[in-house]
Amino acid sequence: MKRFWKALDALVNLLLALGILGIAVICFAQIVARSIFGGSIMWSGEASRYLFVYVVFLASVALTRDNAFICMDLIQSNIPRRIRFYYDLLLRLLLMGYAAVLLVYGVQYAMQNVYQRSSSMHIPKHLLYMIMPTSGFLIILYSLRNIYHDILRKLGKEAVE
């Protein structure tokens, strides 16, 4: 199971890095094309926007994985330690509810756009929109893993990978 999580973590990190690199390269190429060659790359704006959306959704997966979402520290630091487990559980369940909505409606939205293509790059839009249900599924998966580790920690049996 550790190999699965390590591979998934590496994949998410790689896709994030490639997305950010892709945005930087496309924007740099667009600047060079306009300032040096006097023209523009027709699809650069659309490509960088789609990459940005992918990066944002994948970053939410990575934040879930790393327990790094912004939370109310003021509330969390004032909650007694014995109740904090239930507070964290409630937050994780709320996040999973949001991810489930993202998963269900993301699939519906992608399927509604099966026959549409993006305007500049002519990529099928359902492929572009599949990041919504994919990130929803991954957020649920990582949240379940985090809940599992929280339960082990509460029982004093944590063997973190």
Image (spheres, rainbow, N blue to C red):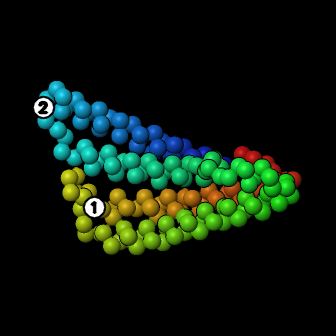
Task: Name the residue that disc number 2 marks.
Answer: 38
Q: Identify whether 105 is placed above or below 131.
A: below
Q: Identify whether 40 is placed above or below 129.
A: above
Residue that extends furthest to the top in the rendered view of this protein = 36
The answer, for residue 56, to whether it is visible in the render is yes
Residue at image coords 30%, 62%: 125
Q: Amino acid at mark 1?
A: Pro
Residue at image coords 80%, 52%: 78
Residue at image coords 56%, 48%: 62
- Mark 1 lies on a secondary structure that is loop
Residue 75, percent across and down?
Answer: 74, 54
Task: Name the residue that disc number 1 marks.
Answer: 124
Residue 23, percent across and down?
Answer: 35, 40
Residue 38, percent across and down?
Answer: 12, 31
Q: Amino acid at mark 2?
A: Gly
Badge 2: residue crowd in 10 Å (few <14, some 14–19, many ≥20): few
